Amino acid sequence: MTALLCLLIAVLTATSVWLMLSRSLVRFLFALVLVSNVANLVIFVGGGLEPLAPALVDTAQPDLVMANPLPQALVLTAIVIGFGLVAFMLVLALSSWKVFRTVDIDQMRFAEPEPDEATTSQLEEPRA
Amino acid sequence: MSWLPVACLLTPLLTAVAVFGSPRNRKLRGLLSIGGAVVLLLLAIWQLMRVSSAGALVVQPGGWKAPFGITLVADNLAAMLVLATAAIAVAITSFALHDIDEFRAEAGFDGFVHVVLTGVVGAFLTGDVFNLYVWFEVMLIGSFALMTLGAGKRQLDGAVKYIALNLVSTVLMLTAIGLLHGLAGTLNLADLHQVMAARENDSLALVVGALFLVAFGIKAAIFPVFSWLPASYHTVPITVSALFAALMTKVGIYALLRIGTLVFGMELASAASLMMALAVLTLLMGVAGALAETSLRRLAAWQVMISVGFLLLGVALGTPAGLAAALFYFVHGMLAKAALLLIIGLGERVGMAERLAESGGVAQLKPWLAAAYLFTALSLAGIPPTAGFWAKLAFVEAGLGADAGTAGTVLIVALVVASLLGLLPLMRIWNEAFCKPSPAGFAPAAPGQVPIHTPSASIFALVSLVGVSALIGIWPTLLHSLAEAAAVGISTPAEYVQVVLGIKPEAGS
């Protein structure tokens, strides 16, 4: 189980890094969704929660192996916060599209214009 | 007395709630915001006096004994930084009163400022590593709102970069916390210190430490991962720039310092040369950026990076004297950076332009503003008798210390080179923006004509920052003794651990 989850973490991390290196803001958004799940899974695996070691055990069976129940609370908190951040990023991507008519990071040079073309607009042609 | 840290935390939070719930009136919201900041300042002064006379305050909310509950700890370091934050908050909220437009105020600008303050104060006061993550999030979400509120094209563009990189850093931090918890089985910082100190030559701990370093490095804008800072700080209203310049990167450094000394004491010591290299590169990058920059506000953003570099020098040296110097600089840097940004904000009404070359004439129109700039610039450069001089003197003394070794020499060389080169951009601002004749449209008022009015709240904000900075310059002993006490506290964590875990019967809450 743990090995499987570790493999999943590796695949998700690789995918999200690949997505993050793209110039598209929408891909970055998907990368963020994946990578925040990676963080949650890491907490989950780090807590040692497994079918053989549940977080809550019956007091009648004190010899059962018990996992640390705290990671569940941590993951829950992290999911809520991650959800909020992803929602914020989604709105940001949407308003970037509305304002710039592009989600290509390379086209967004308003805050840091090229020294020689500071005044010329680079966004004559909208592109997806 | 142990309610004081809780009160410091609740004050900005309740102020934010009050602002969001109040009628959409710019003046009312601004005054509420200033009121909240003043209350925070008074509480922070009380807390610091209490902590320095009677030792650290520890709160165990809900009666959950450490390490099982979330602990709030106000030790010397936390109490000192909360006070500095509160002082900045009073100045920034006063300045916001006239700097922030109707639209932003109605959208809840003042509330978001207090959300950021809640996060910053929480991050300083918490004694729990997962709780630290939560306060970072509170701070981030508030800063995201400030960053995007009223977005023009430039501001939105800067915000995208700021938010994207900070989100990556957040996820790294969360991953590191998950791994740390898996490794140590606890989240309480004091308990973590005991567990981690018992492990020896632990390569897993090194990996987790590296993750934390990258995560906090992005927040603090340390050398290879700093690019969000000059991309975004100049696009927002000057009040926001000043708030971020004074607080945001500093919280990253604080977290690095706290987690580094308490949890990764061994690993931090073995990575000292790496930290020193990062510090020197951050410093040089900041200076190089400032030297090459033609835009006034972005030059100020590079100045923020220079101060991060100086702070990191002290952290990398790691001796109590080095940490004390860094903490002295911490407070001085917060005040000086906020003052510099506010001066630019006021100057933009009387002749400072986006491009430095198109600015001019401020000294003629507003001589007192020129005086404030001159003082702040001298303080940043480290000319006696300003606060910056004492900060740099403390750095040099730490570098010459017997326990500093080669790292001390590196520190002194980097400090001197960065200070000398860092003076040039500050002189360029003086020459271009203050001493040159006014640009078209900003001609000096003819006799009998009303000069451009500066609101008294804005003047109060600037004067209070420069005034406190000047007081530190005249009487550095107080801040220096506070910084020294805080540095001793973090370089010998045993006392912190005892107080938090209640090992000593006479200590604890």
Image (spheres, coloured by chain):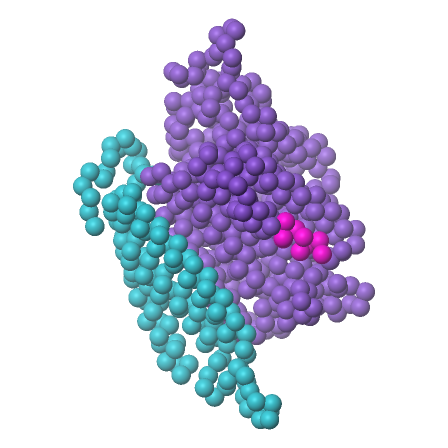
Q: Residue furthest top?
A: B447
Apparent colour of chain B: purple
- The range drawn in magenta is B3-11
Looking at the image, which residue is at 58% across and 68% down? B187
Is residue A48 among the parts visible in the rendering?
yes
In this picture, is A121 found above or below B353? below
Residue B88 lies within the magenta run: no
Looking at the image, which residue is at 29% across and 60% down? A19
* Residue B4: image location, x then y, percent: 71, 53
Which picture quadrant has residue B235? top left
The quarter of the image holding the C terminus of chain B is bottom right
* Residue B191: image location, x then y, percent: 64, 69
* Residue A73: image location, x then y, percent: 52, 71
Apparent colour of chain A: cyan
Which picture quadrant has residue B189? bottom right
Looking at the image, which residue is at 45% across and 86% down? A51
Count of all numbered marks drawn on residues in the image: 0
The quarter of the image holding the N terminus of chain B is bottom right
Q: Residue furthest right?
A: B506
Residue B6 lies within the magenta run: yes
Is residue B280 among the parts visible in the rendering?
no
Does residue B101 appear left or right of residue A57 in this picture?
left
In this picture, is B365 found above or below B97? above
* Residue A12: image location, x then y, percent: 34, 69
Q: Residue furthest left?
A: A125
Main SS of residues in magenta: helix
**Foreground residue among B411 and B443:** B443
In this picture, is B8 found above or below A64? above
**Foreground residue among B432 and B134:** B134
Looking at the image, which residue is at 44% across and 66% down? A79
